[in-house]
Image (tube, helix red, strand yellow):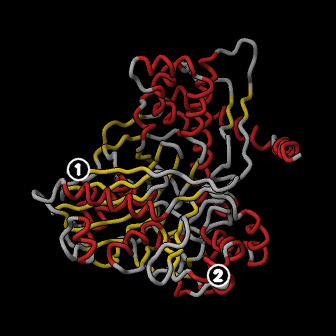
């Protein structure tokens, strides 16, 4: 009996089918464009998301239809983004992605009026424009017709499950990312909903992660080439689902996604609501595995900064790599200095993630002299991105998320050079996992457990270690000094960043 995991992402949708041992049987992927209707906004065409999801589900399923047909479907997705749906099931608005910051004007005043501490104690999150709460307020004021006509506001996984089953449900993790959910009681917060004037009936029913949304309808099954009444599970926020898929859903472990965004998703056996986490904008909410909790420490300008290096600084390496059919990033990393750099890069080339939540981030390269070589600059970029993640890891340790190992996934994990640099900076082992489609794997696992096809203890066998990078002690102490300098530079440049913003505004 095969299991399908579906991942509804910001750039595209993927469906992967696995057998009961975790072996990948088939896969399909389709991209869609980001729509930018005005400065600071970012949307996805929700109709296009549905069409893409249907196509990848159909294509992946057709490959196994005659050999090992799909027995259960699990759906995971990006957090925060939601779609307004009318009572006839039609889509009446686009989904605003996490990076959309149009709701910024609502954040500070609403947060202060409701109560910063109270909001955190209920939701486990600190106020930021990315969260659904503030985007709903923006719709209420700027799109009153959509606000009035919306029967349900559905997150991306909910929307696809609704189209498959006709049911409107979500899970604990996706509800938590909205900032409308009580993470202690695990239900929608009536207090917050009343405060913004939103009837609880306009939100989907909340079920535990992996819980059943319903079964595939006869109409959807016929259209997609699936068997009737296949169970569909609400699996949750892509980061903790991916952590499960790469074998990191246990205390002491964290998944470390190295891609466009760098993200650390740990697991802990209790809900931690602390001043340390709140001050540093690190959320606390249920994990997809029962009895566990998580947070998401993320650097928005992770891999995107390396893309900037590729397109603007490392033109020689990029051109040579493309001539030879090689990966430009591998060539750039190989061209970096072989020893720790004396330069310090602040990689804030745009809005930052945790711990700063700075919408107007700017990059800084400190320590340049006439003797500085290009290879040192390239190394500084690799290190600076990693220092930002180390900052998050150090806060997690202080708050009670003590980590003994990072399970690494994503395109950036292909480079052994960069992985060793990261292990040295973190002072932690980094294990590369054979889990290239970890979010889809996690969703398939949860669906398999819900359907009674998999036992919970069997899931650890799906993700297999490939290689572990141990920190080189000769570099660990050198990086500790440089990391202290990194934090000091960021703190000391606060006034300069404010002046620069005023200059740009004028």
Q: Which residue is mark 1?
A: 24
The residue positioned 27% from the left and 77% from the top of the image is 217
Q: Which residue is mark 2?
A: 192
Relative horizontal placement of residue 142, taking residue 164 as reference (left or right): right
Residue 269 visible from this viewpoint: no
Give the label on residue 466, or none.
none
Which quadrant is the N terminus positioned in?
Answer: bottom left
Q: Earlier in the sequence, mark 2 or mark 1?
A: 1
| In the depicted structure, whether residue 479 falls above or below residue 138 | above
Please, which residue is most extreme toward the left here?
67
The residue positioned 46% from the left and 66% from the top of the image is 156
- Kind of element beneath mark 2: helix
Quarter residue 121 falls in: bottom right
Please, which residue is most extreme toward the top here?
371
- Kind of element beneath mark 1: strand
* Residue 490 point in image, percent of width and height: 75, 41
């Amino acid at each position: 009996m095969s299991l399908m995991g579906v991942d509804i992402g910001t750039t595209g949708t993927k469906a992967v089918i696995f057998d009961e041992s975790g072996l990948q049987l088939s896969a399909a992927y389709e991209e869609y464009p980001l729509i930018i209707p005005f400065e600071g906004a970012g949307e996805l065409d929700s109709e296009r998301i549905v069409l893409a999801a249907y196509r990848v589900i159909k294509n992946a399923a057709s490959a196994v239809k005659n050999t090992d047909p799909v027995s259960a479907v699990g759906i995971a997705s990006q957090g925060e983004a939601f779609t307004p749906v009318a009572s006839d099931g039609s889509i009446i608005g686009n989904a605003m992605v996490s990076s959309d910051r149009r709701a910024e004007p609502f954040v500070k005043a609403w947060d202060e009026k409701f109560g910063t501490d109270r909001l955190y104690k209920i939701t486990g999150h600190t106020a930021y424009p990315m969260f659904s709460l503030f985007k709903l307020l923006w719709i209420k004021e700027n799109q009153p017709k959509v606000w009035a006509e919306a029967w349900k506001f559905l997150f991306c996984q909910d929307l696809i499950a609704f189209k498959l089953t006709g049911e409107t449900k979500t899970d604990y993790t996706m509800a938590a990312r909205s900032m409308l959910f009580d993470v202690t009681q695990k239900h929608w917060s009536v207090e917050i909903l009343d405060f913004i004037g939103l009837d609880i009936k306009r939100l989907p029913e909340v079920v535990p992660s992996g819980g059943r949304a319903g079964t595939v309808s006869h109409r959807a099954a016929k259209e997609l080439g699936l068997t009737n009444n296949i169970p569909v599970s609400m699996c949750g926020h892509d980061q903790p689902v991916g952590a499960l898929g790469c074998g990191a859903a246990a205390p002491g472990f964290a998944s470390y996604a190295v891609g466009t965004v760098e993200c650390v998703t740990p697991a802990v056996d209790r809900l931690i609501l602390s001043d340390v986490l709140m001050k540093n904008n690190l959320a606390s909410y249920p994990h997809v595995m029962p009895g566990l909790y998580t947070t998401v420490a993320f650097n928005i300008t992770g891999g995107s900064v390396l893309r900037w290096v590729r397109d603007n600084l490392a033109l020689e390496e990029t051109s040579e790599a493309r001539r030879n059919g090689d990966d430009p990033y591998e060539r750039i990393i190989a061209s970096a200095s072989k020893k720790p750099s004396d330069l310090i890069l602040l990689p804030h080339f745009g809005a930052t993630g945790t711990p700063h939540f700075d919408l107007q981030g700017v990059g800084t390269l400190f320590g340049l002299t006439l003797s500085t070589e290009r290879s040192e600059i390239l190394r500084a970029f690799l290190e600076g991105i990693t220092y930002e993640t180390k900052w998050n890891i150090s806060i997690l340790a202080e708050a009670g998320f003590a980590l003994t190992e990072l399970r690494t996934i994503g395109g950036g994990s292909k480079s052994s050079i960069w992985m060793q640099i990261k292990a040295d900076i973190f002072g932690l082992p980094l294990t590369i996992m054979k889990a290239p489609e970890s979010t889809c794997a996690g969703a398939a696992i949860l669906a398999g457990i819900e359907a009674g096809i998999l036992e919970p203890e069997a899931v650890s066998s799906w993700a297999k270690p490939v290689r572990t990078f141990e920190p080189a002690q000769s570099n660990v102490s050198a990086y500790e000094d440089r990391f202290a300098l990194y934090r000091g530079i960021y703190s000391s440049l606060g006034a300069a960043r404010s002046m620069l913003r005023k200059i740009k505004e004028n």
